[in-house]
């Protein structure tokens, strides 16, 4: 039996379609016992995205960005978020999109980017799947100052940090972004061994 055999969508109602799509979905789910149960969930569809951690082995550094995130602020985070560069796919391939995002946000034109995994970031309510990448950088790849696109509301600061400092920032609470924590932990285990 597949999951498709255990789900029957009964109703979908659009709650909002301002920037992304928010729906209320009523469905029947066949439980492990065989009993059918009707459930209602709100599902936020914002599309899929990609994120990348640039690293420099020789210097033992990584490039991150710092920016304002309204949802984090509304949930009590009274600081800018330190993150790995990321962006929505918007009909581009994950590799194509992340290359463009790293140029816009961090100012680096990377050569060989490598996909390391995919993950659903908040599967209980959000459809988004994130494609995770790493790429080696060096100073010659810097083609601009980064900072993002002002017309998209971006006001981004670029940070080049020693990997050990970035990992310490997870431990002391200065880095609280899940995708960034995942990429830094990946780098600690597989890149900076």
Image (cartoon, rainbow, N blue to C red):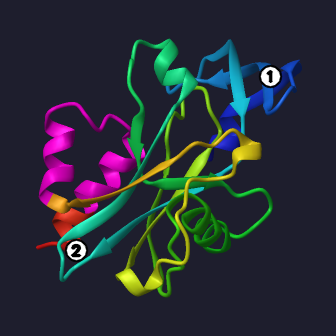
Picture quadrant of residue 44: top right
Residue at image location 53% in from the left, 30% down from the top: 69
Q: Nearer the viewer, residue 70 or 51?
A: 70
Judge the density around disc 2: few (<14), some (14-19), many (≥20) Cα neighbours within 10 Å: some
Q: Is residue 177 left or right of residue 113?
A: left
**Position in image of residue 88 (x %, y %):** 67, 52
Q: Nearer the viewer, residue 43 or 60?
A: 60
**Position in image of residue 53 (x %, y %):** 39, 64
Q: Which residues are magenta?
A: 164-186
Q: Are marks 1 and 2 in contact (CB under 8 Å)?
A: no
The quarter of the image holding the C terminus is: bottom left
Specify whether residue 193 is painted magenta.
Answer: no
**Position in image of residue 153 (x %, y %):** 69, 38
Residue at numbered disc 1:
23
Q: Is residue 53 left or right of residue 7?
A: left
Specify whether residue 171 is painted magenta.
Answer: yes
Q: Nearer the viewer, residue 178 or 139?
A: 139
Report whether residue 33 is seen. Answer: no
Residue at image location 17% in from the left, 65% down from the top: 189
**Position in image of residue 172 (x %, y %):** 15, 33
Residue at numbered disc 2:
191
**Which callout, 1 or 2, points at the residue further toward the start of the chain?**
1
């Amino acid at each position: 039996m597949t999951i498709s055999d255990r789900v029957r969508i009964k109703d979908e109602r659009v709650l909002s379609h301002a920037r992304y799509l928010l729906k209320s979905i009523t469905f029947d789910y066949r439980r492990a016992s065989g009993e059918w149960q009707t459930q209602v969930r709100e599902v936020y569809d914002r599309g899929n995205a990609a994120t990348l951690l640039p690293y420099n082995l020789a210097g033992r550094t990584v490039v991150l960005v710092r920016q304002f995130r309204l949802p984090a602020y509304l949930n009590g985070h009274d600081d800018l978020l330190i993150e790995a560069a990321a962006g929505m796919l918007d009909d581009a391939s994950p590799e194509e999109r992340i290359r463009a995002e790293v140029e816009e946000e961090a100012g680096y034109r990377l050569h060989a980017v490598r996909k390391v995994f995919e993950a659903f970031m908040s599967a209980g309510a959000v459809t988004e799947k994130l494609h995770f990448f790493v790429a080696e950088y060096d100073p010659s790849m810097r083609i601009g100052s980064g900072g993002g696109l002002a017309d998209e509301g971006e006001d981004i600061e670029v940070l080049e940090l020693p990997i050990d400092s970035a990992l310490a920032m997870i431990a002391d609470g200065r880095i609280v972004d899940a995708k960034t924590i995942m990429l830094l932990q990946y780098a600690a285990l597989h890149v900076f061994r």
